[in-house]
Amino acid sequence: MKISHRFIVVDDDSFNNLVCKYTILKYDASADIQLFTDPEKALAVIREEFGNITEGLDTVLFLDINMPIMSGWEFLNEFETYSQNIHRQITIYILSSSIDPGDKIKADGNTFVKGYYPKPLGIETMNQIFG
């Protein structure tokens, strides 16, 4: 996979979002990064920004699964209702502190999830994804 220069991080923990931002920038100093603590707002922005674009904006989305307002699983259910055009532009990776093996199994069974990685995001994870 070629490195994407566009990233979205969806996590209710703003500190984790900053860790993700600095890790991504360390890996790709020119990256465009959007951070969201509200998954519903992230979905609205995705629908607006990606819905009418015909050329691909290859984007990596790091998604937490344990969030209070809308879980990562609910986020994925909503994302599933979006157009194929949007689906083609976004590659989703779960980034979670969950130790529940069921979460990994559930992620592996979701067609939109390309990988499941532990928090915090580190250079090793970036190398696994893009290496």
Image (cartoon, helix red, strand yellow):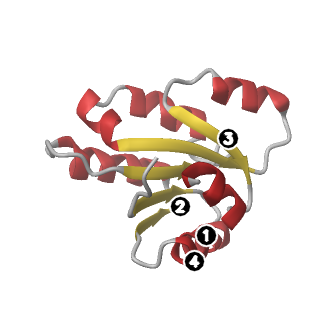
From mark 1 to mark 4, how far is it between C-alphas?
Answer: 18 Å
Which of the marked residues, 2 or 4, is nearer the chain's N terminus? 4
Determine whether label 2 and label 1 are within 8 Å by CB.
Answer: yes
In-front residue for pair 123/33: 123
State the image coordinates of residue 121 (x, y, percent, origin top left). Answer: 68, 62
Which residue bears the numbered disc 1?
Answer: 14
Determine whether label 4 and label 3 are within 8 Å by CB.
Answer: no
Q: Which mark is residue 116?
A: 3
Which of the marked residues, 2 or 3, is nearer the chain's N terminus? 2
Secondary structure found at label 3: strand
Mark 3 residue crowding within 10 angstroms, few (<14) / some (14–19) / many (20+): many
Q: Residue at (74%, 31%) from the top-left corner?
A: 103
Mark 2 residue crowding within 10 angstroms, few (<14) / some (14–19) / many (20+): some
Q: Which mark is residue 37?
A: 2
Q: Which numbered disc, 2 or 3, marks the residue closer to the eye? A: 3
From mark 1 to mark 3, how far is it between C-alphas?
Answer: 20 Å
State the image coordinates of residue 28 (x, y, percent, origin top left). Answer: 48, 72
The kind of residue tagged 1 is Ser
Classify residue 47 by image quadrant.
top left
The kind of residue tagged 4 is Lys
Which of the marked residues, 1 or 3, is nearer the chain's N terminus? 1
Q: Which numbered disc, 2 or 4, marks the residue closer to the eye? A: 4
Which residue bears the numbered disc 4?
Answer: 26
Determine whether label 2 and label 3 are within 8 Å by CB.
Answer: no
Q: Quadrant of the C terminus?
A: bottom right
Determine whether label 1 and label 4 are within 8 Å by CB.
Answer: no
